[in-house]
């Protein structure tokens, strides 16, 4: 089982460059999420998509955009990368049932460095 | 909104028990979860407890839930060096909020 697949695993960008982080899940989950993880900050929610066709801002959405391309795929775009966006990015998915979620499954992460 | 708080660090000797604590504000979830993150990896589900239970035992793991105080704890018996990781509690709320996690150091 592939679960949640993120690409790329590593990326170095120059300030001002743009890029898209890809995420796909094969578990037919309704909800998908993008987090960033910084030392001592835990996981902070950037954007989430409760279902296909919907996206909502999380705790730290500034500087990012997302697209829920279909039920499987949820991409995160940095339009103009900044050094403050150096982080490890995780995509996750879960089965939403009403306002609750069941277990979340995580990808392996994308380590992004902006120089 | 939802809030989850955990202490950032815990250091124990190999063979001792570890207790990782979590307090939360959102008490509407059916399940509460503990996740483990090993270095360089994503989070993986470690164990969970149904919200109407007080305790769940799963081999070396014991989860205690105090719903009145909104307190969740994870006890790891006979802690091994392989248990060194970051542990996150997660209350299953809709926006899937995680705390900062507790980094467990196991000294040989």
Image (cartoon, coloured by chain):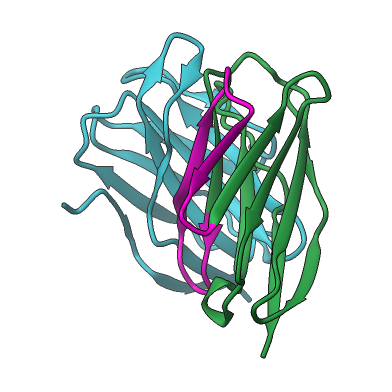
Q: Indicate whether B7 appears above or below B29.
A: below
Q: In which quarter of the image is residue A73?
A: top left
Q: Residue at x 19, y 53 (%)?
A: A2
Q: Which of A5 and A7 is in front in this view?
A: A5
* Total numbered circles: 0
**Residue A28 in picture, x, y percent from top left:** 21, 30
Q: Indicate whether A77 appears above or below A9.
A: above
Q: Chain B is drawn in which colour?
A: green
Q: Residue at x 40, y 20 (%)?
A: A96
Q: Colour of chain A?
A: cyan
**Residue B60 in picture, x, y percent from top left:** 52, 59
* Residue bounds of the magenta highlight: B36-60
**Residue B33 in picture, x, y percent from top left:** 54, 38
Q: In the figure, is residue A44 to the left or right of A89?
A: right
**Residue B104 in picture, x, y percent from top left:** 69, 69
Q: Which of A42 and A54 is in front in this view?
A: A42
Q: Indicate whether A47 appears above or below B25.
A: below
Confirm whether residue B51 shows in the render.
yes
Q: Which residue is drawn at 50% across and 69% down?
A: A111
Q: Nearer the viewer, residue A87 or B70?
A: B70
Q: In the figure, is residue B102 to the left or right of A31?
A: right
Q: Residue at x 31, y 20 (%)?
A: A52
């Amino acid at each position: 089982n592939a679960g949640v697949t993120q690409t790329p695993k590593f990326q170095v960008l120059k300030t001002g460059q743009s890029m898209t982080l890809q995420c796909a899940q094969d578990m037919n989950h309704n909800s998908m999420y993008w987090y960033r993880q910084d030392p001592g900050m835990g996981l902070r929610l950037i954007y989430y998509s409760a279902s296909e066709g919907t996206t909502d801002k999380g705790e730290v959405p500034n500087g990012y955009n997302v697209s829920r391309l279909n039920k499987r795929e949820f991409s995160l775009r940095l339009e103009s990368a900044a050094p403050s966006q150096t982080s490890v990015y995780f995509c996750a998915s879960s089965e939403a049932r009403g306002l609750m979620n069941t277990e979340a499954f995580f990808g392996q992460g994308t380590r992004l460095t902006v120089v | 909104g939802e809030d989850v708080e955990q202490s950032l660090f815990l250091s124990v000797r190999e063979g001792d028990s570890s207790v990782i604590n979590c307090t939360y504000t959102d008490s509407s979830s059916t399940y509460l979860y503990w996740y483990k993150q090993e270095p360089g990896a994503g989070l993986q589900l470690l164990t969970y407890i149904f919200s109407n239970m007080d305790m769940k035992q799963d081999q070396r793991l014991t989860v205690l839930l105090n719903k009145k105080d909104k307190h969740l704890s994870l006890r790891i018996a006979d802690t091994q060096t392989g248990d060194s990781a970051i542990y996150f509690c997660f209350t299953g709320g809709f926006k899937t909020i995680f705390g900062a996690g507790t980094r467990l150091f196991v000294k040989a």
